[in-house]
């Protein structure tokens, strides 16, 4: 059985075990963070990265960076295109980037400009290709290692080149250390190089602790101690707890105390160390993040036949891969360390959500199932723990994965079971900012058909009503005190294809939003009162459904300074001046503001239609089962509005849902649809739904509606429509005298 299969067997065993105490946050040292962002070593004099680049390419690069820094996008774009069109050697572009101070920050700021994004992406790709070309060449690395055995000048050059190659040099360095006949002086210099590599060497060195050579394990421990990063702690502690030689364990203990700054570090359980490391990976600790310059990062392995090796993974999933690995190692150290199960599941769900459709996860092993499959196999307890974590982190993808698992495996009692805070995680999800999460939670709770009321049951119906109103069109909530300005902004926003709900004050706009499909973006005038801008923003952030919405302030000149202060305190806030506002500028501002809320992306029409249809079907299901928990009469208004929807399927679904409500007005609304100018299929479905309603609650139709039905039965309408109308007429069971009158008054003129 491979290691992954063993680990997952452990996961499934631990499913039955009660969760342990809450975890503690880790840090680089046991007493504090002190970590720094991962960076590659600076290029040293005489190295390949510092080799001068001259000529047209260097001139174009310099001008490109210069114009980016002074915000001259037009000129920068011209020089950027010149660089790309010259088809440069990627190694030269990489060397220029290394020799340019803060070049990455410059590119990151500029790539936010739509006109620069493609050019900068292409140049960053060239830099990455050049990095691989310059620093990863195995032959050059081997030559640099050989230089460590030569005279001092060669040693200095070899050392600098190896430091430049960073983690890519570690496999050959370890391999050389394992050679029994390698000169002692060369091994000593390799040890010095490993220690000077710093953070980039930590992960490959930790994986290399699996080397069969005790001598090399001691050198690795010493190097990790000199580097001094906490992330080596779990691996050193595991080595200390193993049955290794006393000399190796002594080296591991010394290094462990150094990296943790804790003399008692050896007493802490191995599982706790690895769980803490998994948490730090999951939360994206600064010292653990992959190099932001590159699209891929390395996951390191030790294989008996190959030694130290790695797999490149997309940077987007790197932290999740290592979080899963560390959580698994916690379980391998202690199968009863159950918090690691939910953390592993959460990282797996997040990893899958972050993989682009064209990307793959090379760390998957044969037979590994989908994240959803593992989440379902773990059971309700762990799925709820994952959901709690996702809600706390504001992670919609993980929340949706957890809800899917819960809906597929848990009964009603487990779904509504209160958590430590007194409310079920699934109920808490009903107020999550992302509407998909809210809808999935409502679907799970309604679909479980609970038989007893629970805290938050009324919110399920509220969310179902929101789902019924979905159209797939983005909605802006506009708050502007001045009526003329509000009408002006509203017209401009509508010209851009948005729906608008508005009001002169926040309370009125929020009330309008609650009667709509919800909001995707908020636009506030800086002169609003009762409450003012600052208080309004605070109220929006305190409300679950608006807490993560982007906010665009249309600011008066006098308010710009205070608006900028608000924007500095809230990354989802944008500002545009009212003085020179026109349609193109507002369009650009709304687009930029909406991009900040990318985690709550607007639904397209197909997705919105799916949820609206599903909500109507859920209301019907609950009505048929005569739910004692949910007040479905609250849905009548939204369902009745759906009868005039442009989507035929939604009109039919709303009619069928209204049919199971104990409401005369609902029955009358269905009958009105049946005699409207709707397509034949919709009219037939409406007659059938009205018939069902009449059978359930009796005839509640008006006399005018009754006469209209008789007329249809006696008309020259299509046989299908007359048949459906006849079914309704029969269900109405009109008194014999009344039906005689109706029939005799519908005769044809001239008989």
Image: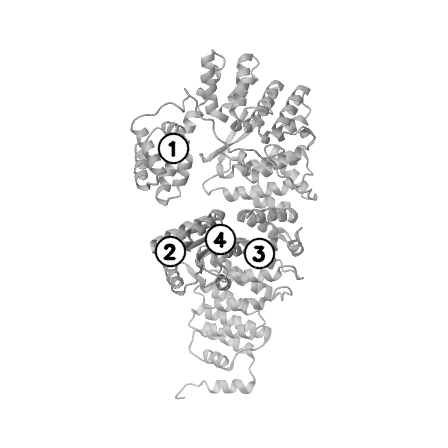
Q: Which residue is mark 1?
A: 126
Vertical order, 352 against 311 (above or below)? below
- Examine the rendering and report whether any part of residue 406 can be seen: yes
| Location of residue 345 in the rendering, given as x and y in whole percent from the top left corner | 60, 43
Vertical order, 287 against 748 (above or below)? above
| Badge 1 or badge 4: first in the primary sequence | 1
Q: What's the residue at 60%, 59% (across, down)?
A: 446
Q: Which residue is mark 4?
A: 549
Q: How far apart in space, not on screen, are marks 2 and 1 (Cα)?
A: 41 Å
**On residue 430, which mark appears?**
3
Q: How far apart in space, not on screen, are marks 3 and 1 (Cα)?
A: 45 Å
| Badge 2 or badge 3: first in the primary sequence | 3
| Badge 3 or badge 4: first in the primary sequence | 3
Of all residues, the one furthest to the bottom in this rendering is 750
**On residue 578, which mark appears?**
2
**Quarter that holds the N terminus:** top right
Q: What's the residue at 40%, 51% (across, down)?
A: 591
Q: Are marks 1 and 4 in contact (CB under 8 Å)?
A: no
In this view of the protein, which residue sits in the foreground, 69 or 369? 69
């Amino acid at each position: 059985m491979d290691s992954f299969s063993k680990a997952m067997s452990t996961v499934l065993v631990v499913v039955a075990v009660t969760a342990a105490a809450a975890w503690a946050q880790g840090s680089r040292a046991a007493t504090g963070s002190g970590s720094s962002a991962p960076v590659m070593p600076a290029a040293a004099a005489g190295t390949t990265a510092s080799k001068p680049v001259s000529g047209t390419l260097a001139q174009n690069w310099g001008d490109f960076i210069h114009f980016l820094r002074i915000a001259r996008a037009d000129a920068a774009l011209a020089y950027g295109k010149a660089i790309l069109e010259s088809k440069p050697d990627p190694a030269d572009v990489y060397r220029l980037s290394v020799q340019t101070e803060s070049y990455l920050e410059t590119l990151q700021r500029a790539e936010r400009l739509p006109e620069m994004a493609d050019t900068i992406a292409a140049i960053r790709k060239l830099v990455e290709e050049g990095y691989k070309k310059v620093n990863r060449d195995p032959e050059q690395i081997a030559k640099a290692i050989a230089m460590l055995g030569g005279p001092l000048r060669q040693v200095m050059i070899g050392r600098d080149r190896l430091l430049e190659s960073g983690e890519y040099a570690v496999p050959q360095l370890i391999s050389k250390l394992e050679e029994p006949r390698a000169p002692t002086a060369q091994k000593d210099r390799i040890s010095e190089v490993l220690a000077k590599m710093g953070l980039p060497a930590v992960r490959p060195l930790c994986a290399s602790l699996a080397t069969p050579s005790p001598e090399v394990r001691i050198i690795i421990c010493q190097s990790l101690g000199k580097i001094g990063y906490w992330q080596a702690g779990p691996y050193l502690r595991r080595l200390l707890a193993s049955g290794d030689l006393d000399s190796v364990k002594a080296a591991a203990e010394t290094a462990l105390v150094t990296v943790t700054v804790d003399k008692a570090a050896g007493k802490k359980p191995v599982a706790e160390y690895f769980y803490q490391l998994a948490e730090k990976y999951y939360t994206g600790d600064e010292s653990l993040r992959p190099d932001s310059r590159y699209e891929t990062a390395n996951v390191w392995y030790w294989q008996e036949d190959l030694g130290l090796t790695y797999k490149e993974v997309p940077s987007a999933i790197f932290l999740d891969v290592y979080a899963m690995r560390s959580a698994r190692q916690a379980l391998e150290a202690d199968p009863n360390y159950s918090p690691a199960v939910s953390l592993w599941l959460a990282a797996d769900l997040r990893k899958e959500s972050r993989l682009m459709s064209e990307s793959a996860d090379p760390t998957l092993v044969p037979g590994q199932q989908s994240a959803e499959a593992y989440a379902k196999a773990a059971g309700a307890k762990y799925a709820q723990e994952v959901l709690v974590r996702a809600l706390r982190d504001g992670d919609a993808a993980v929340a949706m994965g957890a809800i899917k698992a819960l809906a597929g495996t848990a009964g009603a009692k487990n779904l509504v079971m209160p958590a430590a805070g007194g409310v079920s995680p699934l109920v808490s999800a009903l107020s999550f900012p992302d509407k998909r999460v809210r809808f999935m939670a409502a679907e799970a709770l309604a679909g479980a058909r609970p038989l007893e009321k629970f805290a938050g049951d009324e919110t399920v119906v509220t969310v179902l009503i929101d789902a019924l109103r979905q159209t797939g069109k983005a909605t802006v909530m506009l708050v502007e005190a001045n009526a003329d300005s509000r009408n002006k902004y509203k017209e401009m926003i509508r010209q851009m294809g948005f729906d608008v709900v508005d009001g002169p004050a926040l309370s009125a706009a929020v009330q309008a939003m609650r009667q709509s499909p919800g909001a995707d973006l908020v636009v506030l005038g800086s002169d609003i009162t009762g409450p003012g801008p600052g208080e309004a923003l605070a109220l929006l952030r305190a409300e679950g459904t608006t807490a993560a919405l982007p906010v665009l302030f249309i600011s008066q000149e006098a308010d710009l300074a205070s608006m900028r202060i608000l924007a500095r305190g809230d990354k989802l806030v944008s500002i545009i001046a009212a003085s020179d506002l026109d349609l193109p500028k507002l369009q650009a501002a709304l687009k930029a503001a909406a991009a900040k809320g990318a985690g709550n992306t607007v639904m397209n029409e197909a997705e919105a239609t799916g949820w609206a249809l599903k909500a109507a079907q859920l209301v019907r299901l609950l009505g048929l089962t005569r739910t004692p928990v949910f007040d479905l009469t609250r849905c009548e208004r939204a369902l009745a509005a759906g009868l005039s929807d442009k989507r035929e399927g939604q009109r039919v679904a709303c009619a069928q849902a209204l049919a199971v409500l104990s409401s005369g007005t609902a029955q009358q609304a269905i009958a009105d649809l049946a005699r409207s100018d709707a397509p034949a299929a919709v009219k037939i479905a409406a007659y059938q739904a009205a018939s069902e309603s009449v059978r359930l609650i009796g005839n509640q139709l008006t006399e005018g509606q009754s006469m209209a039905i008789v007329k249809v039965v006696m008309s020259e309408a299509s046989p299908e429509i007359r048949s459906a109308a006849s079914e309704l007429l029969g269900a109405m069971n009109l008194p014999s005298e009344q039906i005689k009158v109706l029939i005799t008054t519908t005769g044809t003129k001239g008989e």
